[in-house]
Image (cartoon, rainbow, N blue to C red):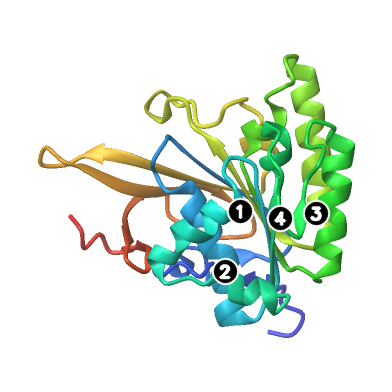
Amino acid sequence: MDGEYRVERVKSGIPGLDELVNGGFPKNTTILVTGSTGTGKTTFGAQFIYKGAAEYGEPGVFVTLEERAQDLRRETKTFGWDFRKYEEEGLIAIIDGVSSTVGLPSEEKFVLEDRLNVENFLRYIYRVVKAINARRLVIDSVPSIAFRLREEAQIREVLLKLNTILLEMGVTSILTTEAPDPKAGKISRYGIEEYISRGLILLDFRERDVELKRYLLIRKMRETKHSMRKYPFEITNNGIVVYPSGEMY
């Protein structure tokens, strides 16, 4: 139909996920990926960046605030992902936001020297995004940005500013955060992350036959028709795979 509004989509790079969200994430939006420890949030973000470069030729920036860049590269090699290759080609930039905070020297090309100053933090990310003409961005994780802030009003202000600047950058972004108690409805550390993001994906465990199984729930995705079912997923030798029809169970 002439004049029909069509939402541009960005492929997630995660097998089984795109068919649950009309072919991919809405372009230039912010997706919050939340979950408890060990559910695969960092892997989810790394796969989004790596597959974007390797399969779709889309440059991406990964901001690591919880582990060193070299550790991220080593861990993702278990999935057969060679981040260094695409860094050298200018398709991926990893921003080391850990070394300077713990007082360690860094040999990385992109080092966040002052992540405690939110203005400087956002300004530096913006420069790196523009330097490689990034189309994708991951920040892992939100609590690591706000951990020095004690007042709820400060945290709210910082997160609102972060979301606004991400949208202005013209990138499709994934933010990770901790879910303190998903079963009780507490799906983010500060209780505001889910409101500023335009999409929300929860990763969690449930017990099945005396064994913990991973599942994914799309709680929100603007401009997208999606189910509210819990879908099983696995972290395989090739990364995350989602099972839309529930084959695992």
Q: Nearer the viewer, mark 1 or mark 4?
A: 4
Callout 2: 10 Å neighbours few (<14), some, many (20+)? many
Q: CA distance from mark 1 to mark 2?
A: 10 Å
Mark 3 residue element: helix
Callout 3: 10 Å neighbours few (<14), some, many (20+)? some
Among the two numbered marks 2 and 3 on one chain, the one whose residue lies closer to the N terminus = 2
Q: Amino acid at mark 3?
A: Leu
Among the two numbered marks 3 and 4 on one chain, the one whose residue lies closer to the N terminus = 4
Q: Is residue 233 above or below residue 178?
A: below
Q: CA distance from mark 2 to mark 4?
A: 16 Å
Mark 1 residue element: helix
Where residue 225 appears, x then y in whole percent? 53, 60
Mark 2 residue element: helix
Q: Are discs 2 and 3 less than 8 Å apart at CB? A: no
Specify the label residue 167 is tagged with: 3
Residue appearing at x 67%, y 25% in the figure: 147
Residue tagged 2: 83
Q: Residue 28 sits in which quadrant?
A: bottom right
| Nearest the eye: 36 or 246 | 36
Q: Residue furthest bottom?
A: 2
Q: Nearer the viewer, mark 3 or mark 4?
A: 4
Specify the label residue 188 is tagged with: none
Residue 165 shown left or right of residue 229 in the figure: right
- The image quadrant where one finds the C terminus is bottom left
Q: Amino acid at mark 4?
A: Glu
Residue tagged 1: 69
Residue appearing at x 64%, y 42% in the figure: 65
Residue tagged 4: 107
Among the two numbered marks 1 and 3 on one chain, the one whose residue lies closer to the N terminus = 1
Q: Is residue 231 above or below residue 192?
A: below
Where residue 68 appears, x then y in whole percent? 59, 47
